[in-house]
Image (cartoon, grey):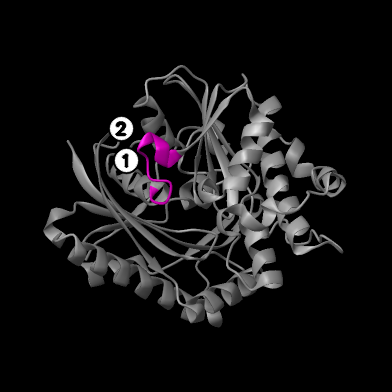
Amino acid sequence: MMMTAIGLMSGTSLDGVDVALIETDGKRVKAFGPSGYRPYTDKERGLLLQALTEAVDLPQRDARPGILREAERAVTIAHAEAVATFTAQNRITSEDIDIVGFHGQTVLHRPERGLTVQIGDAAALAKAIHIPVMHDFRAADVAAGGQGAPFVPVYHRALAQSLEREGPIVVVNIGGVSNITYIDGSEILIACDTGPGNALLDDYMFRVMKQRFDCEGRLAAQGTADQGWIGCALKLPFFALPPPKSLDRNDFASLKLGQMSPADGAATLTAFTVAAIAGIVPLLPKVPKSWVVAGGGARNLTMLRMLRERLAPATVEAADTLGWSADAIEAQAFGFLAARGLKGLPLSYPATTGVPMPMTGGVIARP
């Protein structure tokens, strides 16, 4: 049975809430609907950055001390506003939607401690939008010993199968963190985080240039990457681990660039992200034939150029060129995952998160 689902995603880049509508039966995608975006205000973003700092010492996943309670309220309101604006603009009523997939805002991801924390009050959201909300997608996986990330691979597989091209295909999502999904036919699905995405670069751009990101990779294009620094950074133990593996946005925050021009700094961090993605190839069963780039990194032309150089002779394409929405893909995925969760289908697998057996997940909050 086909369902109409709205997916919501607020990623590690802390830029805002993505909204997307899809029609799906939880196995394939019948149609993409419209998508939308509600940016965080500077005040909300500041609150979330504070929440990230305070969440480091969280004793358990449902604790909301101090600023975390305020941040959770802000996240919930932002998502409710995002849905209200989206449905109004597209003339959609709450009765038109079967389920909303609500990821929430990750403030701590420590699977080795059995802890993953996404803030956002699903019960309050369901009441505000008058639609059932599926949330808490990662908890069951982590409780069963999985990494709790990445969770989008099952959606990437549904998209890749629609391309009908020879594999292996890798979908790489470059958000705050970069993650890959390796797809070879309908059976083989491997996924993991590869290392930094845009988080280090965005934080650097804000610190040095007072800009949110390196638009189209223009600053990095003017600089020269420090290959020695990248080589040292790639010696961190994470990079040698086989998939599945996952990261927290701030796992590389301790890496310092030292004295270099802003352009060289941007080039170095962009090349580091690319080198970390390319470094996963020897850890995969076969060398991929094609790569599809989604997330914010798909708009960074310097990053795409560097990826093509590193991954040749494989093809490297931005998701948009295939008719996919690079911006909405993760929001679409959580609509898809909500539909799968409703049907009790697996959301994660041993080779995507390291969970011992395929796991479903998600909890429903009703209006």
* Residue highlighted by disc 2: 27
Q: What residue type is labelled 2?
A: Lys
Q: In this view, does 84 lie above or below 279?
A: below
Residue 186 shown left or right of residue 100 in the figure: right
Q: Residues within 10 Å of mark 1 (few under 14, many from 20)?
A: many
Residue 295, percent across and down?
49, 49
Mark 2 or 1: in front is: 2
Name the residue: 61% across, 19% down: 286
Image quadrant in which the N terminus is located: top left
Q: Which residue is at the far top? A: 166
Q: Residue at x 60, y 69 (%)?
A: 211
Instruction: Give residue 67's position: percent from left, percent from top.
Output: 54, 81
Mark closest to the chain's N terminus, 2 or 1: 2
Is there CB contact under 8 Å for labels 2 and 1? Answer: yes
Quadrant including the C terminus? bottom left
Q: Is residue 51 above or below residue 22?
A: below
In the image, the segment drawn in magenta is 319-328
Residue drawn at the location 57% of the way across and 74% of the way down: 51
Q: Is residue 135 above or below residue 24?
A: below
Q: Would you say residue 104 sits in the magenta stretch? A: no
In front: 68, or 199?
199
Farthest-out residue, front: 222
Seen at 76% across and 36% down, the residue is 240
Residue 263 visible? The answer is yes
Q: What element carries label 1?
A: helix
Res 340 label: 1
In percent of width and height, residue 318 lies at 48, 39
Q: Report the front residue among 355 and 274.
A: 274
Label 2 to label 1, Cα distance in Å? 7 Å
Q: Depth check: 53 or 295 in front? A: 295
Does the magenta run of residues contain 321? yes
